[in-house]
Amino acid sequence: MSNQARTKADNRAMIQKYSAFILLAAILLLNIAVTPNFFSVGTAWNIVTQTCVAILTGMGMTMVIATGGIDISVGAVMALAGIVSAKLLPYGLLAAILGALILCSVSGMIAGVMVGKLRVQPMVVTLALMIGVRGVAQVLNDAKIFNITGPHAEAYKMLGSYKLFGILPFQIIPIVAVIALVYFIMRKMVLGLYIQAVGDNQRSARMAGISGAKTIMFVYMASAVLAGVAGILATAKIGAADGNSLGRLAELDAIAAVAVGGTSMSGGRVKIFGTVVGALIMQLLTIMVNMNNIPYEYANIFKAVIIVAAVYIQRERSV
């Protein structure tokens, strides 16, 4: 290979590696140029609060996709967590949160057992859960909106509205904590190697003594618990639990964040911070459309184009 060809290949590899970050910078610059009042503290914190759900569900989705799976039930799990936590609130804030997350983990365990042990296709399993879990959330309050009131209501709502030092949105704490935890698991623990090994080649991983079933069960339970956290925070923000609409299409934003961020959709390669960047890109597009009075449908078109482009770049890497 000539020096010119090698340089060209290196440049292409560099662009592919940092494509999500380049795109994020481009969208930020575009927003600064065309979006009124974009470059302000209020807008920055608005981005944090609105991206919270995509980042939390995206972190769980990253681990699931790293094993070669998919989880399209996260939006329904969010709705379940919101309804259950609101219903349990009379027993105390901690009881409400723990009860909701335990029930969410059961949903994840069912998915993990079906996919890991019974070898059912992840899409089929999580599609069934998406329908069934959403149905449970609706049945728990007769498909009505549950307005959060009572002795612990204000403490619950603070999870969605409280500002640290009067400035920083509370949501930044779970965002940073979850990103750090997932990074530690995937980069510093043997479990992270197991997850990626299962995604690369489950048969080879099994021959190396790695329990694919247990690994898969862990990632689906983790995905469900993180979706539950996102559901509780989203419910606290609006002060009401809605089993009908809460978390609807959240799974698509999570998958989009993972795809745009560079994690291989076929499993194995993981980009933790890439998912964060992907979630920010999706939210910045929405904010740009909203703040410039552009019909929301255009945001979906922009997102679709970016997702297709990201998957195409990912395909080039694997060829």
Image (spheres, rainbow, N blue to C red):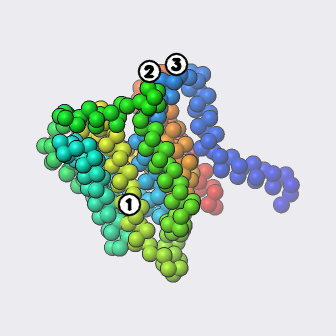
Question: Which residue carries the number 3 mark?
Answer: 37
Q: Residues within 10 Å of mark 1 (few under 14, many from 20)?
A: many
Point 38% across, 60% down: residue: 220
Q: Nearer the viewer, residue 261 or 294?
A: 261
Question: Which residue carries the number 1 mark?
Answer: 220
Q: Residues within 10 Å of mark 3 (few under 14, many from 20)?
A: few
Q: In the image, what residue type sits under mark 1?
A: Tyr
Q: In the image, what residue type sits under mark 3?
A: Asn
Total numbered labels: 3
Residue 254 drawn at (x, y percent): 43, 47
Residue 154 drawn at (x, y percent): 26, 32
In the drawing, does residue 103 fall left or right of residue 32?
left
Look at discs 3 and 2 and give the one toward the viewer: 3
**Quadrant containing the N terminus in the rendered view:** bottom right
Q: In the image, what residue type sits under mark 2?
A: Asn
Marks 1/3: CA–CA distance:
40 Å
Residues tagged 3 and 2 counted as in contact (Cβ below 8 A): no
> Sequence order check: which comes first, mark 1 or mark 3?
3
